[in-house]
Image (cartoon, rainbow, N blue to C red):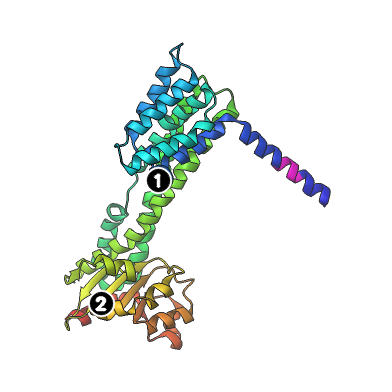
């Protein structure tokens, strides 16, 4: 067994060493550094700066009297000067150039930086702009038609339908973008003199795919949260519940609620739309109970689409903190005596709201 283990380790080490030695592996690190916002200010999101930087590299390469150190410094100067003097962004650009400096040792490295800027970072930014930031346009027509046909009984399915349609629709756009983007990138790489073989091309292509998926994944997370908030707003509007208030930022942040409805007694129901509960839910609720009374919130109603991690103990604890949880009508938890005081079927959501506001 030890000989097999050693053999596998040796093979893995060979792969790592080959990767580190291939200069086109730098496309991945260049792309990450250009987009990284917390350390370098995300200058890679500035398409014009990226395109002009790549153009500058190409022009400098054609001058016989310009060596790589001069060209590198010229590119760094341009990146820094593109940020406002005295700004935090300018300091972040300086830090980027300091960290890029030892990674660029010859013309090939500098050309790879230009390739990364023009043919990886910029196209991905443009592709992301084509992907919806929410599911509203895709899912609204069918959700509205479903509610018109089934009325309040349709509530048990409409959130799941919205979630499924929105997710599939947006991911279909993502797929179309990556397929088209890869096709264009391959054509570009075939014309590039610096690409020596298929392995070089593979490093660039995998950088493109990894960076696209990383950034689109971030967009996907934000879209998921807004999706549930949008469908809840559509439900309330469809059934004529108009006493909906904007949630003050301090309440949204502390209680993680999306909408508030004013009740007939002057108090409010806060509504939270989630796929599932995060691990910090208990801390969020127990630390902010005073916020409920201070803002005349009689309770928080949670619309949950995925209940697998929602244990009975968690439901009871939340219920004791003035929470009501709306679950899919098919949920077996609705029949458990220990939690029946704290859970409600999704189809009763609108009628329950009406009782509070009428």
Question: Which residue is under mark 1?
Answer: 37
| Among the 4 quarters of the image, the one containing residue 146 | bottom left
Q: Reply above or below: 110 against 262.
A: above
- From this viewpoint, which residue is outermost toward the front? 86
| Among the 4 quarters of the image, the one containing residue 328 | bottom left
- Residue 244 vs residue 157, the one in the foreground: 244
Q: Find residue 334 and report its horizontal and vertical position in percent.
A: 41, 81
Look at the image and tell me in which quarter the C terminus lies: bottom left
Q: Which residue is depicted at the point 26% across and 65% down?
A: 249
Left or right: 329 in relation to 148: right
- From this viewpoint, which residue is outermost toward the bottom? 337
Q: Residues within 10 Å of mark 2 (few under 14, many from 20)?
A: many
Is residue 179 visible in this depiction of the protein?
Answer: no
Question: Which residue is under mark 2?
Answer: 269
| Among the 4 quarters of the image, the one containing residue 261 | bottom left
- Residue 179 vs residue 54, the one in the foreground: 54
Residue 292 located within the stretch drawn in magenta = no
Q: Find residue 103 and report its horizontal and vertical position in percent.
A: 53, 32
For marks 2 and 1, the one nearer the N-term is: 1
Provide the residue span drawn in magenta: 8-12
Q: Which residue is depicted at the point 74% across and 45% down?
A: 9
Q: Find residue 122 and report its horizontal and vertical position in percent.
A: 38, 34
């Amino acid at each position: 067994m030890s000989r097999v283990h050693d053999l596998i380790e040796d093979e893995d080490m060979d792969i790592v060493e080959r990767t580190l030695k291939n200069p086109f592996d730098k496309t991945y690190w260049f792309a990450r550094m250009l987009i990284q916002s917390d350390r370098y200010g995300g200058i890679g999101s500035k398409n014009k700066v990226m395109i002009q930087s790549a153009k500058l590299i190409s022009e400098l390469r054609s001058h016989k009297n310009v060596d790589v150190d001069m060209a590198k410094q010229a590119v760094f100067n341009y990146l820094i000067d593109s940020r406002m003097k005295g700004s935090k962004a300018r300091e972040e650009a300086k830090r980027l150039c300091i960290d890029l400096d030892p990674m660029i040792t010859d013309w090939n490295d500098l050309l790879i930086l230009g390739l990364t800027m023009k043919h990886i970072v910029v196209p991905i930014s443009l592709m992301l702009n084509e992907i919806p930031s929410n599911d509203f346009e895709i899912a609204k027509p069918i959700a509205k038609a479903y509610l018109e046909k089934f009325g309040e009984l349709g509530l048990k399915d409409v959130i799941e339908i919205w979630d499924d349609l929105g997710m599939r629709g947006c991911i279909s756009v993502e797929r179309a973008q990556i397929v088209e983007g890869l096709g264009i990138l391959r054509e570009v790489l075939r014309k590039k003199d610096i690409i020596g073989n298929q392995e070089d091309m593979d490093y660039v292509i995998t950088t493109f795919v990894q960076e696209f998926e990383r950034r689109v994944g971030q967009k996907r997370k934000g879209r998921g949260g807004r999706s549930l908030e949008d469908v809840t707003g559509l439900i309330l509007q469809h059934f004529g519940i108009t006493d909906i208030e904007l949630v003050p930022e301090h309440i949204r942040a502390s209680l993680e609620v999306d909408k508030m409805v004013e009740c007939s007694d002057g108090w409010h129901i806060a509504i939270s739309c989630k796929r599932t509960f995060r691990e910090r839910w208990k801390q969020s609720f127990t630390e902010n109970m005073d916020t409920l009374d201070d803002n005349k919130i009689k309770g928080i109603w949670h619309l949950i689409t995925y209940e697998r991690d929602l244990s009975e103990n968690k439901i009871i604890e939340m219920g004791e903190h003035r929470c009501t949880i709306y679950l899919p009508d098919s949920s077996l938890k609705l029949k458990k005596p220990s939690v029946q005081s704290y859970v409600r079927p999704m189809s009763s959501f609108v009628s329950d709201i009406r009782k509070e506001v009428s």
